[in-house]
Image (cartoon, rainbow, N blue to C red):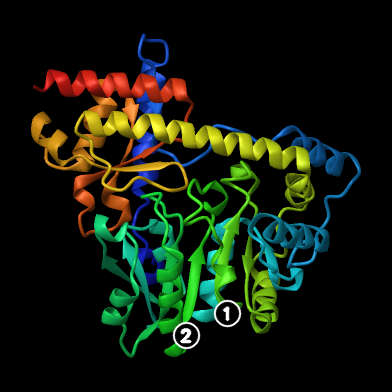
Amino acid sequence: MRVSRRAERIEPFYVMEVAKAAGQLAREVAHSDRPMVFLNIGEPDFTAPPLVQEAAIRAVRDGATQYTQATGLQELRERISGWYMQRFGVQVPARRIVVTAGASAALQLACLALVEAGDEILMPDPSYPCNRHFVSAAEGQAVLVPTTAAERFQLSAAKVEEHWNARTRGVLLASPSNPTGTSIAPDELRRIHSFVSAKGGITLLDEIYLGLSHDDTYGQTALAIDDQVISINSFSKYFNMTGWRLGWLVVPDALVPVVEKLAQNLFICPSTVAQHAALACFDAESIAEYERRRAEFKARRDWFIPELNAMGLTVPVMPDGAFYAWADCSQACARLGIKDSWDFAFEVMQRAHVAVTPGRDFGTAQTANFIRFSTASSMAHLQDAAARLRSLLAQAG
């Protein structure tokens, strides 16, 4: 059977390949004295809080399960609008908010609406792999621009200008970022958007970890800059609703009917039950719980990253958000006599029963030297994993 070139351009999602191998080994060692500790997947160990669960049950019981508008429940769009004002002091009208089937659908809709065949979209290297594949699926080309720790692994206005050419359509950034957990300084983001706008380009910003910012210096939405910025967000991370597949997109007024038309044809609407459940995310009791959990994520970061640094798995930039540690494992690889982070991931999986994610997914610049740890697991799991890694590296001398 002939497969489309579009499908062939999409690289494997190595995060999931490693996860499959870890899952298989986990089954084999499940009853041993060292069951697998998973620090590889970016999924909160918290689930939806009680009010959200109760709202979902109520929606099913009351028969609120039929199609909604393609742009989502009006009440939910208004709740999201209110959250922007309450949390960030930014007015984002509900009419500009499109509820989507997860941030993945939001990214796909944005790319299909704005990217033509052959258009280039600038992205930092490293960055989340699926983002570049959304560009590719829209017949565009993601251009990965190498970044450094001194740049917080983020694009700068100078680098955007340096790499801009006649084919460049815009930028796709993430703040905070996966895999680094770092954000773009607000002034730098303004400079990037100013340059892109002057070129008639688009600024797409993945803000799915914005609610999990730990530093007020960075914890502001890009929507405060300009109503032409396009923001992608999600109920998965801060709101702990990963499997519910619900997100949203904030677009300029002129783009709403375009995105709505695409959503009608591609998705009909997001999950109705998930939308009704998400209304309860914004109740005061739920927000208080989310803030408690945010503090817990910060506590995990503050404990785990010094542990990594002490054993030579150096995190060159302290993440200011999300729940990741982007650690340089090159010294550890040398001690273990292995080649790169891909081999390191399988070495620690087999010998320490700790699942981590190699840098291969996230770019090509220096990613063979880096490993991504997820600190979304419990403190007990992080402490167990750190002890096992210390022991493994101590044996290597």
Residue that label 1 marks: 228
* Looking at the image, residue 130 lies above or below residue 21: below
Q: Nearer the viewer, residue 343 or 228?
A: 228
Circle 2 is placed at which residue position? 197
Query: Three-letter amino acid code at disc 1?
Result: Gln
Q: Position of residue 276 (x, y in %)?
A: 80, 49
- Seen in the image, is 348 located left or right of residue 265? left
How far is mark 2 from mark 1, CA to CA? 9 Å
Left or right of 337? Residue 255 is: right
Judge whether 27 appears above or below 44 on screen: above
Q: Where's residue 363, x and y in %?
A: 28, 58
Looking at the picture, tell me which residue is in the foreground, 215 or 290: 215
Residue at 78% x, 44% y is: 283
- Seen in the picture, residue 359 relative to 46 is either above or below; the reply is below
Tell me if label 2 and label 1 are in contact, CB under 8 Å. yes
| Quadrant of image for the C terminus | top left
Residue 246 percent coordinates (x, y): 65, 53
Q: For the N terminus, which image quadrant?
A: bottom left
